Image (spheres, rainbow, N blue to C red):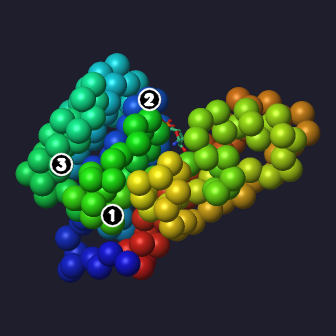
Amino acid sequence: MIKLTGFKKINTAVFISGNGSNLKNLIKFSLSKKSPIKIKFVVSNKKNAKGLKYPKKFKIDFKVYSFLNKSKSEKRILKDLENKKIELICLAGFMKVLSKNFIKKFGPKILNIHPSLLPKYKGLNTHKRVIENKEKFSGCTVHYVDSNLDSGKIILQKKVRVRKNENYKMLEKKILKQEYILYPKAIMKIFNL
Ligand code: GRF
């Protein structure tokens, strides 16, 4: 459990690689009075990530790290996070697996959102695999990050029904809507709010 000190919001960094719709949603949430977080920094491993339009729009600091040399990029990120006094990281569609060393150095305050009912369907192409396997249910999960892919202690999950004629694009859209509700809820939960 992370303790909130007084009314000061927790400096948070969001890591993205793509569209950034969860980032946009988290920025909106962070601007609400009830939110325990303030998004101070956005990290991307892709310079063309569409989601970078959001830190630009909301005047939030952002930086792109190439990850051509993972350990060098991670070291640079850690330094920047320290300078900006970041206490919480929210991964939101970040396509790199953070190293054990990074996780150990930053501490246990890294969250991720994954579009499945973990521990089922870790990794990529979740919705496609769910449809192919004719699953009746899918959903999304917010969890703490450890050094294995899409593992770590689960904070919250939301289950949705998969309809018979649903394709994976429709399912993706449906689950994304739930992700926008679940991520802020999970953040409130870890702060005991
Ligand atoms: C989301 O489905 C998230 O669960 C997964 O990657 C996707 C990112 O979407 N980890 P977006 O970039 O937030 O729109």
Disc 1: residue Cβ within 8 A of ligand 1's nearest atom:
no
Q: Is residue 62 left or right of residue 48?
A: left
**N-term-proximal mark, 1 vs 2:** 2
Assign a secondary structure to mark 3: helix
Q: Residue pushed farthest top? A: 48
**N-term-proximal mark, 3 vs 1:** 3
Give the residue pinned by disc 3.
78
* Residue shown at the point (72%, 58%) measured from the top left: 159
Give the residue pinned by disc 1.
109
- Spatial CA distance of label 3 from label 2 is 21 Å
Residue 46: x and y, percent? 33, 25
- Spatial CA distance of label 3 from label 1 is 13 Å
Amino acid type, label 3? Leu
**N-term-proximal mark, 3 vs 2:** 2
Amino acid type, label 1? Lys
Disc 2: residue Cβ within 8 A of ligand 1's nearest atom:
yes
Give the residue pinned by disc 2.
18
* Residue shown at the point (80%, 30%) measured from the top left: 167
Q: Is residue 167 above or below residue 108?
A: above
